[in-house]
Amino acid sequence: MPTPSVPEPAGPPPRLHVVLYQPEIAANVGAVGRTCVAIGAMLWLVRPLGFLIGDRQLKRAGLDYWEHLRWRVVDDLEEMAGCVGPDRCCWAFSTRAERAFTEAQYREGDALVFGPESRGLPGRLVEDRPDRAVRIPIRAEARSLNLSVSVAVGAFEAIRQIEAG
């Protein structure tokens, strides 16, 4: 059964698009949704999802922010890219990328794409566009950051750059 999507609320265009490719953990998505509300970003969830949208953990992590969230569920990244528009950059966040996320030049309306918690983005998304692949530098002992933490780090850097103009 397909996961329902909700109509996007009226208002100004989103400052950023945060894309979660095949997210697995409801609590992480709830926390990401809360970050999206805080920065004026739209959240895209790319199927399949590892939870139900009505999941109690999702709502609990998003608290009372969920009703203010602009979000949509799509079948694939191509559908999301078609909605965001061809003139927007899609930045793939991956531990396999060479370029640090702070070296990217983010613009209003860009999309930040993050992979599932257990495996990250497919290699093709990093290899096909290495100029659009970025990483958050961390020590090797950590392997990776929690998804919601990665989104917050990347999104707030993008917003910082956008506001600096």
Image (spheres, rainbow, N blue to C red):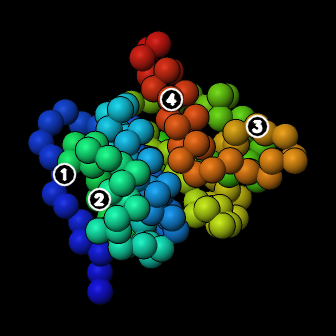
Which residue lies under the disc numbered 3? 137
Q: Tell me the crowding category of disc 2: few under 14, some 14 to 19, or many 20 or more residues within 10 angstroms, Cα based.
A: some
Element type where label 2 sits in the image: strand
Above or below residue 21? Residue 92 is: above
Q: Which residue sits at x=60%, y=43%?
A: 150
Q: CA distance from mark 1 to mark 2?
A: 7 Å
Query: Which mark is drawn over residue 19?
Result: none
> What is the residue that sits farthest to the bottom in this orientation?
1
Give the mark count.
4
| Closer-to-camera residue (151/146) | 146
Residue 162: percent from the left, percent from the top? 44, 22
Give the mark nearest the N terminus, 4 or 3: 3
Q: Tell me the crowding category of disc 3: few under 14, some 14 to 19, or many 20 or more residues within 10 angstroms, Cα based.
A: some
Q: CA distance from mark 4 to mark 1?
A: 22 Å
> What is the residue that sits farthest to the right in this orientation?
141
Q: Which residue sits at x=46%, y=57%?
A: 27
Question: Mark 2 is on which residue type?
Answer: Arg
Give the mark nearest the N terminus, 1 or 3: 1
Question: Mark 4 is on which residue type?
Answer: Phe
Q: CA distance from mark 1 to mark 3?
A: 34 Å
| Closer-to-camera residue (55/130) | 55
Query: Which mark is drawn over residue 72?
Result: 2
Which residue lies under the disc numbered 1? 8
Which residue lies under the disc numbered 4? 156
Q: CA distance from mark 3 to mark 2?
A: 29 Å
Residue 121: percent from the left, percent from the top? 62, 62
Q: Quadrant of the N terminus?
A: bottom left
